[in-house]
Image: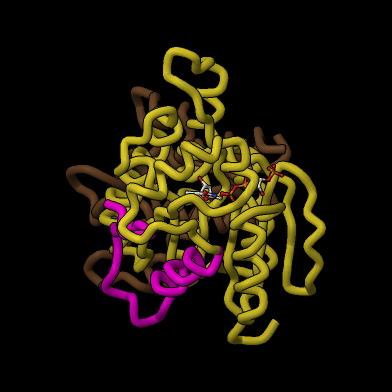
C-alpha cells in the first residue's frame, strides 16, 4: 500500500473540517469512525453528503496527487455501502487511493 | 492569473462550433480548457488543449483533476462535443448507435459530473449542453441522433433541479443546421426540406449559437435553469 490508512483518514478528517466551517454549530459532522453519514442518526442531508464527497475527492487529490471518483460502481452496488459511516468511508477511500495510478 | 480570469471548459474544440466558441470566449477574456480526441492547432496563451475522448471516464477524470490543480475552480462548461448518424433506423448499425450515445449522452454526463464538482468549489457555475432541432422536429433518418439529444434534454432538466442547490445552472441550446462537417454529407434536398420546417428559414450561424450561450452565461441569467432554447423558431 502506497498510502497508509492513517494518512487517508487524516485527509478525510480535513475534508470534514472544511465542510464544518460552513455548517451551523448544531449540525457539525463528527470525525469518529462511528459517525453516521446518512439515514437515521445523521446530521447530513443528501446535499451535505454530496458536498462531503466533493471535499474528500479534492482533499485526496491535493494530498496524494491522484484522481478518484467516490461514485464508483463497486461502491454503489455494495450491499454494505461505504458511505455508511466515517470509518467505512475512510477504509473505502484508502482502497481507492491505493488502486489509483 | 488575474483575480478576474474565469475558466471555461469546452468539449469538441478541434473544429466546428466548439472551435468557434473557444476563440469567441478567449477573445472575451476567458481561460479556455478544450478537448477533442485529436490535437488542436488553436494556439492562444489562455487556451489549454486536452486530447480526451469525452466518453472515456478515466480520461475525463484526469482532465478535471489537472484543471482543478491548475486553476482551482471552473465557472462554465459547454458540452459541445457530439457526433451524428444519419441513417434509416433499419440500416443503423449497433456500433454506430453505441458510439453516438457514448459521445453525446455519456460524454455530457461525465463532464457534468466531474466539472460540477469544480464548479461547486468555485461557488457555482453555468453548464450549457448541446441539443438539436432534430429532436422536436422528429426528423426522419436521425432517430439515434435525435434520441441521444432527447436524453441530453432530460439530463439538462433533471440536473438543473439537482444542481440548483449548488448554484450550478444547467441549460441547453438546440441549434438548427449550421454549416460544419457534421452535416456535410446530408443531401441538399433533405436540408432544404428541413429548413422549410423552421419559422425562420435559413442556416444557423456560429453567432446564433454563441448568442444563446452568452445569454445562459450572463450574470443576470441567474434565474434561468433547466431550459432548452432552440434556434430558428423551432420547438
Ligand atoms: N452543425 C449543426 O448543424 C448542428 C446542429 C445542431 C446541433 N449541433 C451540435 O453542435 C455540436 C457541435 O457540432 P459541430 O457541427 O461543430 O460538429 P463537428 O464540426 O463535427 O465537430 C465536432 C467536434 O467534436 C469533437 N468530438 C467528436 N467526438 C468526440 C469525442 N468522442 N470526444 C471528444 N471530442 C469529440 C471533434 O473533434 P475530434 O474529432 O478531434 O474528437 C470536433 O472538434 C454537437 O453537439 C452537435 O450535435 C450541430
Using the image as rendered, state which of residue B31 and residue B164 is in the foreground.
Answer: B31
Q: Does A21 appear in magenta? A: no
The chain assigned the colour yellow in the figure is B
Q: Residue at x 64, y 63 (%)?
A: B20
The chain assigned the colour brown in the figure is A
Residue B171 visible in the snapshot: no
x%, y% of residue A80? Answer: 35, 27
Residue B225 visible in the snapshot: yes
Q: Give the image quarter of residue B186.
A: top right
x%, y% of residue A51? Answer: 39, 58
Q: Residue at x 76, y 44 (%)?
A: B38
Q: Is residue B94 left or right of residue B67?
A: left
x%, y% of residue B194? Answer: 40, 44
x%, y% of residue B119? Answer: 48, 64
Using the image as rendered, state which of residue A38 and residue B46 is in the foreground.
Answer: B46
Q: Is residue B173 left or right of residue B98?
A: left
Give the residues in magenta: B206-235
Amino acid at each position: 500500500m502506497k498510502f497508509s490508512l492513517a494518512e487517508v483518514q487524516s485527509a478525510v478528517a480535513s475534508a470534514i473540517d472544511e465542510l464544518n466551517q460552513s455548517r451551523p454549530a448544531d449540525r457539525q459532522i463528527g470525525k469518529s469512525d462511528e459517525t453516521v453519514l446518512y439515514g437515521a442518526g445523521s446530521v447530513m442531508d443528501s446535499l451535505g453528503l454530496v458536498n462531503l464527497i466533493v471535499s474528500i475527492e479534492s482533499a485526496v487529490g491535493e494530498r496524494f496527487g491522484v484522481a478518484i471518483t467516490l461514485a464508483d460502481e463497486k461502491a454503489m452496488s455494495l450491499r454494505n455501502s461505504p458511505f455508511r459511516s466515517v470509518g467505512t468511508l475512510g477504509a473505502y477511500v484508502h482502497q481507492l487511493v491505493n488502486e489509483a495510478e | 492569473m488575474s483575480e478576474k480570469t474565469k475558466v471555461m471548459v469546452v468539449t469538441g474544440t478541434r473544429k466546428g462550433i466548439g472551435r468557434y466558441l473557444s476563440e469567441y470566449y478567449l477573445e472575451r477574456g476567458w481561460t479556455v480548457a478544450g478537448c477533442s480526441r485529436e490535437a488542436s492547432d488553436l494556439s492562444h496563451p489562455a487556451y489549454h488543449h486536452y486530447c480526451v475522448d469525452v466518453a472515456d471516464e478515466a480520461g475525463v477524470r484526469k482532465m478535471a483533476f489537472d484543471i482543478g490543480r491548475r486553476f482551482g475552480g471552473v465557472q462554465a462548461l459547454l458540452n459541445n462535443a457530439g457526433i451524428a448518424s444519419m441513417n434509416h433506423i433499419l440500416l443503423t448499425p449497433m456500433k454506430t448507435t453505441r458510439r453516438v450515445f457514448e459521445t453525446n449522452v455519456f460524454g455530457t454526463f461525465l463532464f457534468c459530473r466531474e466539472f460540477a464538482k469544480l464548479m461547486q468549489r468555485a461557488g457555482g457555475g453555468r453548464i450549457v449542453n448541446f441539443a438539436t432541432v432534430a429532436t422536436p422536429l422528429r426528423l426522419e433518418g436521425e432517430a439515434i441522433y435525435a434520441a441521444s439529444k432527447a436524453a441530453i434534454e432530460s439530463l439538462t432538466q433533471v440536473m438543473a433541479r439537482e444542481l440548483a442547490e449548488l448554484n450550478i445552472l444547467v441549460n441547453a441550446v438546440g441549434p438548427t443546421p449550421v454549416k460544419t462537417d457534421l452535416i456535410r454529407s446530408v443531401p441538399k434536398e433533405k436540408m432544404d426540406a428541413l429548413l422549410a420546417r423552421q419559422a425562420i428559414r435559413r442556416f444557423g450561424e456560429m453567432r446564433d449559437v454563441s448568442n444563446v450561450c452568452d445569454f445562459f452565461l450572463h450574470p443576470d441569467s441567474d434565474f434561468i435553469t433547466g431550459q432548452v432554447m432552440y434556434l430558428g423558431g423551432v420547438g
